[in-house]
Image (cartoon, rainbow, N blue to C red):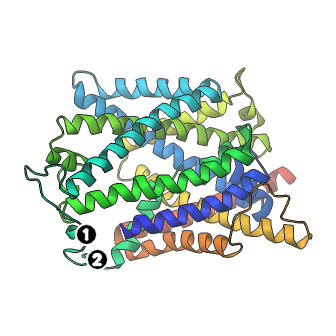
Amino acid sequence: MLAYSIGAVIVYLVMLCLGELSVAMPFTGAFHVYARQYLGPATGFVTAILYWLTWTVALGSELTGAAMIMYGWFPGVPVWVWAATFIILVLVLNMASVKVFAEAETVLSGIKVAAIIIFIALGTAAIIGLLPYEGHRSFLGLTNLYRDGLFPNGFGAVFTTILAVNFAFSGTELIGITAGEVEDPGTTIPRAIRATLARLAIFFIGSIIVIAALIPWEKAGVEESPFVTVLSRIGVPYAGDLMNIVILAAILSAANSGLYASTRMLWSLANEGTLPTVLARTNRYGVPALAMSLSMVGGLASLLTSAYAASTVYLVLVSVSGLAVVLVWAVIAACHLSFRRRRLAKDRSLEDLPYRAPGYPWVSIAALGLSTASCLLIVFDPEQRGGLAITAVFLVVCYVGYWVANRRISL
């Protein structure tokens, strides 16, 4: 729970930084553009590649997960048929106008939000004794939270968990990518930041408190999803199937957003001339169709490597993408520091900024420091330590590749 709380703080600090940048400079592919402008073109390129890789790897995992859920319900239909069905569905939603994408995302997100609210309400009722739990109705309280001490696995477990928690929070930075396509970023983005804080505090941390209060820490998630365990013990019929419906909606929502984000990153790189400009072409709805198709091909490659090279290629992809999103957060914070510093150096007033992040420079410094620490602290976990080394090598390859490509162009 502490790891989730720390992760929520990091996300909120990063969103404050991104909010000011996005409202002041509402570009599609936002933080990649900011990195290029304030940290150098090479860092801008690497930021875009990291973020594109994050979502394409996730896209493959999400398509596999959605197909497996459907296979569990309909074992007579091959998994690849369901995967192909969801690929077509996600492509259709994204190939249409941004309005169609947004409406689909609203429906899918609404299912998730409603499910979590119901879960927290039922769990809270069981904790205070209003509903029976495992056939008995009594005040359960929060004793499971501290029964074996606040840190039964040691405080170091917080360090090794924080990266996974931050990866679970990935996607909140999408408000920056959409900045160039919303009608009124000065109003929409600050509202989205406030909604992000509420969502993190209520939905993520609230549901974790309910789970931790009702399931002993050593038994949570051992045999089944802790959400299913809680609902089953409360007496909710078909708890497993109901949660699978919610998970399916969440997976499709993530795939929908992931394809959108990865596509805009490729479009942004092509629009500035770093990638072939053909990727910047759009269809009649204003959607970069070729960039989207290439992103989906990346997702399919991830899907195939998860099936046929899980212990080699896919392991490398997951290792890099797991750290990538947190590195992007660090880049956002660094961009905000540079943005403010340059603005103040030119004696430009902050009053004309439509949205100002509070607490400068401490908010930016904290966001940068905590994001960086989240990546470095995984050295305490032997299972994740290799991912840090792989990511470092990947970053070097990206920087060297960018330098070589630009040197050839200049010659």
User: Which quadrant holds the N terminus?
Assistant: bottom left
Q: Secondary structure at mark 2?
A: loop
Q: At 65% across and 56% down in the image, what residue appears?
A: 47
Q: Residue 308: in sight, yes or no?
A: no
Image marks 2 and 1: residues in contact by CB distance under 8 Å = yes
- Circle 2 is placed at which residue position? 150
Q: Quick one: label 2, few (<14), some, or many (20+) residues within 10 Å?
A: few
Q: Position of residue 281 (x, y in %)?
A: 75, 29
Q: Position of residue 408 (x, y in %)?
A: 80, 52
**Amino acid type, mark 2:** Leu
- Circle 1 is placed at which residue position? 145
Q: Quick one: label 1, few (<14), some, or many (20+) residues within 10 Å?
A: many
Counting residues from the start of the chain, the first of labels 2 and 1 encountered is 1
Note whether 149 is above or below 193 in the view shown. below
Q: Is residue 105 left or right of residue 290?
A: left
Q: Secondary structure at mark 1?
A: helix
Q: At 52% across and 29% down in the image, what residue appears?
A: 104
**Amino acid type, mark 1:** Leu
Q: At 77% across and 36% down in the image, what residue appears?
A: 277
